[in-house]
Image (tube, grey):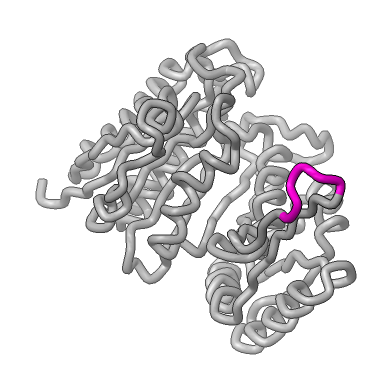
Amino acid sequence: MDVVHRIALIPGDGIGREVVPAAAEVLEAAARRFGFALRWEELDWGCERLLRTGAMLPADGLEALADLDAIFLGAVGDPRVPDHVSLWGLLIPIRRRFRQYVNLRPARLLPGVPSPLAAVPAGGIDMVIVRENNEGEYSEIGGRLYPGTEEEMAVQEAVFTRRGVDRVLRYAFALAAARRGRLTSATKSNGIVHTMPFWDERVAAVARDFPQVAVEQYHIDILAAHFVQRPERFDVVVASNLFGDILSDLSAAVTGSIGLAPSANLNPEREHPSMFEPVHGSAPDIAGRGIANPMAQILSGAMMLRHLGQARAADAVEAAVAQVLAEGGPRTPDLGGNAGTAEVARAVASALA
């Protein structure tokens, strides 16, 4: 077995500690079947570590990730820690240190999974959200003035650079060209009068290099409505950091469960490791009960395998998930079943074998 992939394994918080080990077992089964190895380097980073030591990760933690092939993350967040502290203490530093400027979030309605939208048939939704992941509305620039007084104010700056916008747009256009040739851009240029017109201008400029791609744009409010009314029409949707975050959760919801939604934080140039995580977060309301759906974590692992060059293994993992769902295999409560995390993961591993 000559090929060995070194992976940082960060279960993180909440249900991450349950779905990550379950997904890792499925990925191990894929590795055995297709003749490569996964060498996990498990790290205890997260809110528990913060509460214990005062930091989500060690001071030299990011440098320890630099030479690895990928990062497999479970979830970040704990009710005892403010969300902005946990997010900016781990997830965002990794995304920015390693130039993971594409957040890729596929949304497919899989066979055997009913959509909450009654008119959508099986297989009727197959879209990918390409979210700008390093700048935009998620900026550290800003602050508060006169805290605790009647004059208190908060300022948050959005940052859109030509380099940052163009590189994510080019990724999205290339992806659309390789798929069904349709790209939708999310905007709000009628109300956000500087950054969104700039975004629209860059979409038009980059589009000239991709004449084979049909381009449309919608304001974010009506686009959210269209995701509910006619989600089958969308192929690749590109959006700024905030809009992409919102749309990807909505796309997961209309495909049956956020527990099925994977994502990848990509450095497309492969100069740095990329990170793979489910969309669902730490879900503290069900943490520790063993009922979290592991499929989003498993599918995130399939995205990781494909990024590592193991496309056959990635296809097999995705097919195993689809088979378990289509054949009425065990399901966690979010999909209307009563199975636990481990039982569902074992079923996927069995289908894979």
Q: Residue at x 24, y 38 (%)?
A: 40
The quarter of the picture where residue 26 lies is top left
The quarter of the picture where residue 159 lies is bottom right
Q: Is residue 205 above or below residue 352?
A: below
From this viewpoint, is residue 322 visible?
Answer: no
Q: Quadrant of the C terminus?
A: top left
The quarter of the picture where residue 53 lies is top left
- Residue 266: x percent and y percent? 44, 59
Left or right of 16 on screen, residue 35? left
Q: Residue at x 56, y 21 (%)?
A: 328
Q: Residue at x 49, y 25 (%)?
A: 14
Number of callouts in the render? 0
- Residue 237: x percent and y percent? 67, 62
Q: Which residues are magenta?
A: 145-150
Dominant SS type (magenta):
loop
Residue at the extreme left: 2
- Residue 106: x percent and y percent? 58, 50
Is residue 166 part of the magenta span, yes or no? no
From this viewpoint, is residue 97 visible?
Answer: yes
- Residue 339: x percent and y percent? 52, 13
Q: Is residue 343 above or below residue 258?
A: above
